[in-house]
Image (tube, rainbow, N blue to C red):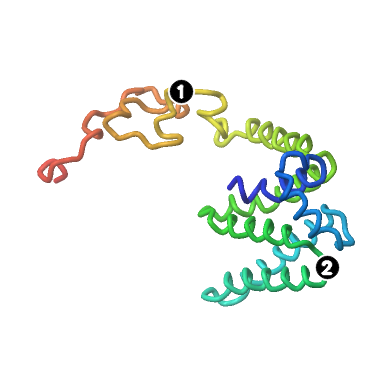
């Protein structure tokens, strides 16, 4: 998720504003690959990202068994041709390809779609302000998520507002025998869970 959202923006911020963060040999390699590129890095990133998104949308409308394959291979082939034509640099093709592959790993389709849309504002902020713009965009996203509510419950609870007692089911699912109380966010009057639900039922009990 973080690679899909942040990798192009971070790469753009580093090569434009913070090249000292990279080793010298890598900086020389990136500079040599961008020597013949006629576009700024931001425009180059937008060209590749939009091209990849167009191919992804085309792959959705192709029959399922070959749709995703066509979108990935098409992006790589077009990226290789663009590099040979001197329109985009090879590192940018690698970054966009890794970003697209990382977005396919996300199992939740709506989350992957949201990250695809959020990637473009972060690209603009990183292209204009560097790491400062990237952090500014992430702070705005965090503020927005903290302000959301779902059925009256804060969207990020138990992380914001912080509730340590509800962390047993947040990052790592604790075993049932260790979760003896219900989450505070439910607002239930019966705070303690039924002990019979904390162990597997015997065959005669399930009947």
Q: What is the C-alpha distance between the residues marked 1 and 2?
A: 54 Å
| Residue drawn at the location 71% of the way across and 62% of the way down | 93
Point out residue 35 in the picture as x, y percentages from the top left corner.
85, 59
Circle 1 — which element?
helix
| Residue drawn at the location 72% of the way across and 48% of the way down | 11
- Would you place residue 83 above or below residue 100 in this image? below
The mark nearer the N terminus, 1 or 2, is: 2
Residue picked out by circle 2? 86
Is residue 75 found left or right of 162 in the rendered image?
A: right
Residue picked out by circle 1? 164
Point out residue 18 in the picture as x, y percentages from the top left corner.
78, 40
- Would you place residue 178 above or below residue 94 in this image? above
Name the image quarter holding residue 171: top left
Name the image quarter holding residue 19: top right
Label 1 crowding class (10 Å Cα cut-off): few <14, some 14-19, many 20+? few
Circle 2 — which element?
loop
Q: Could you say which is closer to the camera, residue 199 or residue 139? A: 139
Q: Could you say which is closer to the camera, residue 61 or residue 191? A: 61
Name the image quarter holding residue 36: bottom right
Point out residue 53 in the picture as x, y percentages from the top left corner.
70, 63
Which dot, 1 or 2, sits closer to the camera?
2
Label 2 crowding class (10 Å Cα cut-off): few <14, some 14-19, many 20+? some
Residues at circles 1 and 2 in contact by the CB criterion of under 8 Å? no
Is residue 74 found left or right of 191 in the rendered image?
A: right
Point out residue 101 in the picture as x, y percentages from the top left corner.
59, 59
- Would you place residue 67 above or below residue 134 in this image? below
């Amino acid at each position: 998720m973080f690679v899909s959202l942040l990798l192009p923006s971070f790469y753009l911020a580093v090569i434009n504003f913070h090249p000292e963060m990279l080793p010298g040999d890598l900086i020389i390699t990136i500079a040599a690959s961008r020597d013949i590129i006629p576009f700024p890095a931001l425009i180059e990133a937008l060209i590749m990202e939009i091209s990849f998104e167009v191919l992804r949308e085309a792959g959705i409308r192709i029959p399922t068994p070959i749709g995703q394959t066509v979108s990935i291979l098409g992006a790589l082939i077009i990226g290789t041709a663009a590099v040979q034509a001197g329109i985009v640099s090879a590192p940018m093709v690698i970054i966009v390809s890794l970003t697209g592959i990382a977005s396919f790993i996300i199992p939740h389709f709506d989350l992957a779609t949201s990250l695809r849309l959020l990637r473009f504002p972060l690209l603009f902020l990183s292209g204009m302000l560097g790491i400062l713009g990237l952090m500014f965009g992430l702070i705005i996203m965090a503020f927005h998520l903290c302000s959301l509510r779902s059925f009256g419950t804060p969207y990020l609870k138990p992380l914001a507002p912080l509730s340590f007692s509800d962390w047993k089911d947040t990052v790592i699912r604790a075993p049932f025998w260790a979760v003896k109380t219900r989450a505070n966010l439910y607002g239930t009057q019966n705070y303690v869970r039924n002990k019979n639900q904390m162990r597997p039922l015997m065959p005669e009990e399930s009947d």
